[in-house]
Image (cartoon, rainbow, N blue to C red):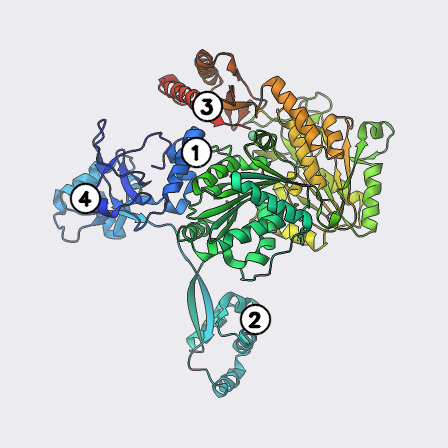
Amino acid sequence: MPIPLQKLFTYKITEAEADFIEIGTRVAVPFGKSKIYTAVVFEKHNEEPTAYEAKEIYQILDEYPIVTKLQLDQWEWISSYYMCSLGDVLRASLPKAFLLESETLVLKRTDFDREEILNDEEYLIWEALEQESKLKIHDISKILDKKGVLSVINGLLAKDAIEVKEEIFEQYRPKYVKYADLTSRYQSEQELHQLLDGLGRAPKQREILLNFFQLKRGKKEPVLLKELREKSRASSVVIKRLVDKGIFEIIEVREDRVSFETESRPIHELNDWQLDALRKIKGVFKEKEVCLLHGVTSSGKTEIYTHLIADTLKKGKQILYLLPEIALTTHIISRLQLFFGDHISVFHSRYSVDERVEVWNNLLSNSDKAQIILGARSSVLLPFSNLGLIIVDEEHESSFKQFEPAPRYHARDTAILLGKLHNANVVLGSATPSIETFYNVKQNKYGYVRLDRRYGDVMLPEIELVDIKEKHRKKLMKGHFSDRLLKLMEEALLEKEQIILFQNRRGYSPVVECSTCGVAPQCPNCDVSLTYHKFNNELKCHYCGYHQGLPRTCPACENPTLDTKGFGTEQIELELQELFPGSNIARMDLDTTRGKYSYQKLLKSFHEREIDILVGTQMLTKGLDFKNVTLVGVLNADNLLNFPDFRAHERTYQLMVQVSGRAGRDQKRGKVAIQSFNPYHQILQQVTTHDYLGMYEDQMNERHQFSYPPLMRLIRIMLKHKDLIKVDSAANWMGKSLQNSFGDQVLGPTSPSIGRIRNKYIKTMLIKLPANKSLKAPKHLISKIRDSFMSISEFRSVQVIVDVDCY
Ligand code: ADP
Ligand code: ZN
């Protein structure tokens, strides 16, 4: 059932139904007093439940299973590993359109003529039905202005005045595309000439026709109506006139929403280093399921993937290519499309419900179009039927982990399990592998292949640290730019080369503070300061979306001395416009990339060199491949290093190396300037020397010393409630119970650094468990504690979130 309950429910079916229903088909079932849910058949059996009487199902919704057996195995694993319900996994996996909505319809019986026996309420409904012919339950609630209307409906039923119908609406609508073509009347040259002459006095219609001929030239197929309209700038009215005259006919064709041109170029030949890596990867797969490909940025990892993909295609097996970010999918898809044409389907959350249903169905039927699935996190939940290869690109990326809502799964780890289920090979690729993956290599769990040369022997960029403490002292800063960074930028611009600037925060300035009294305006719903956005002169909360105009005076002391502190991408963009008035400057962050195609547009114009300087957040560090970028600037590395998290140093290393990797991907050696108040910090030094192993050793020492993953496992328990006192006492109860079972392996309860979000107070507890022991027993204990907690009436309204591997 698509509900967050741990249990499976048993329903009654007839023998005939039992023959028909297969595991993985959907059925509509009654639940509770009046609800209908779409459930998925998990098991067929002969045991009557003892605790309740099994109800009958309403309806079988599929002719064939839409969920595979392997998927159900995967769901069970996710549910038990990440401590969530099967229903949570079902909801996350199935496209929304598969979870049908139930709407009970009430219809009038035409043979009923004894209105006098109806009571007042019944009569009201009867009367309404004369007008409407059918009503839904909530319409009836509205008419009677009350909630419990089932008794009224039952009364009407008993008196044979109405009938009810359960109608389940399929939400998926196939897409139809309209084409225009000439009717059969106009086929010969002569007829066409006559036609054109005849339209002499209708210039608009004539023009449409001429445009039609141009579009049609040499093609058999009809012309896309949309294209025709755009080309001739004609309104649909004019086109309709041509249809009415019997000149055009409009043809509707059902089409898959996402289709790509077939275009198959041979894949690139690999150079010696790449060939060697490919051979080693294949060698690893003879012994192990998982292989880490540790290749420096621009070494051609993607090219190696294409070879693995081509091999797998030849064997007739499916490929899953996981990417951390949607921005990347557009970039990589255009590369892969060149080779694999329409064997590729793309799947991610910005696709509409209907588009997702199509990918799902194509995969189930092992259609030619869905041999390669390119997608973000959730595509690991798709119904693969014959998977041969999984690629997890940029495996170190934190966006593979889902934090909200349940299931709180990690797509890389789930992909490794998926690989096991299908007996498929898994490649994890990265220039900066996560500590836990590299640890698994050291433990001999994963194979390891290294690629140290950039393609074309382009050198790794030269990385320079700029001490901005010093620069401030010597007054060599202009806004947030040191004289050194400015000089490098001028040089690059002079050569007509492009520049990428990285700043970790969006908005204009993270904090607005009163210089008289020191108060910073806070979000009313969350315990964070509001971020200033200059563009619309607003203060915004990045946690809940709350916003207000920037007040003129300080809300506390009423002096007009609200000042901006710190800085974000928006401020950098504005400073740039003053510093480089002749250059084209653009910004790439969450605020500028909300629309479905906005990423694509930005990247395209950067690619076409319409933009000289691109400033952005994390988003632009990932895998982008632009030949003409020779300079990368990091405005401030310190706020990353100082982030209060055990992975802050690892993440800083990864981010700095990744963003540096955007520089100099062609012949000329790239340059990177990292500005910092702390240029002697060990991590920054390791970045400049590309010293991954040194970084790994240091970090492992720290993890060892302070008991953190990968040496320990972390499970976080989070409680949330509007009432601070309630959440406090709940956390006390929970903390004590956990300590009873786990002793000093429990940290907390504490308030996280942001103690309130969206008006809810938060308390967290962290359980550290040894990584080399099974988690089964501890998880079982935690589940039991969670169950007893939820059975305490006082705590029933407290939200409990369990997050396994919460990092
Ligand atoms: P990575 O994924 O390791 O960052 P890419 O696969 O993006 O590296 O390769 C970097 C650039 O070099 C790309 O533009 C890619 O097309 C090019 N390249 C790499 N290997 C080859 C090859 N064998 N043949 C042609 N071009 C290649
Ligand atoms: Zn807020």
Q: Which mark is residue 232?
A: 2
Check disc 2 and report its element: helix, strand or loop.
helix
Beta carbon of the mark 1 residue lies under 8 A of ligand 1: no
Circle 1 crowding by C-alpha within 10 Å: few under 14, some 14–19, many from 20: many
For residue 78, which quarter of the picture? Answer: top left
Q: Could you tell which of marks 4 and 2 lies nearer the N-terminus? A: 4
Q: Are marks 3 and 1 in contact (CB under 8 Å)?
A: no
Q: Residue furthest right?
A: 474
262 lies above or below 581: below
Which amino acid, by three-letter code, is at mark 4? Glu
Q: CA distance from mark 4 to mark 2?
A: 62 Å
Query: Which residue is under mark 3?
Result: 774
First in sequence, mark 3 or 1: give its number: 1
- The residue where tag 1 is placed is 78
Tell me if label 1 and label 2 are in contact, CB under 8 Å: no
Badge 3: how crowded within 10 Å, few (<14), some, or many (20+)? few
From mark 1 to mark 4, how far is it between C-alphas?
A: 32 Å
Question: Which corner quadrant holds the N terminus?
Answer: top left
- Mark 1 to mark 2: distance in Å? 54 Å
**Whether residue 208 is situated above or below residue 294 in the rendered picture:** below
Q: Are marks 3 and 2 in contact (CB under 8 Å)?
A: no
Q: CA distance from mark 3 to mark 1?
A: 16 Å
Q: Which mark is residue 15?
A: 4
Pick whichever of labels 4 and 3 is earlier in the sequence. 4
Q: Quadrant of residue 93?
A: top left
Does dot 3 land on a helix, a strand or a loop? Answer: loop
Q: Foreground residue, 574 or 134?
A: 574
Task: Please state which of the two labelled residues, at mark 4 or mark 3, is closer to the viewer.
Answer: 3
Of badges 4 and 2, nearer the viewer stands 4
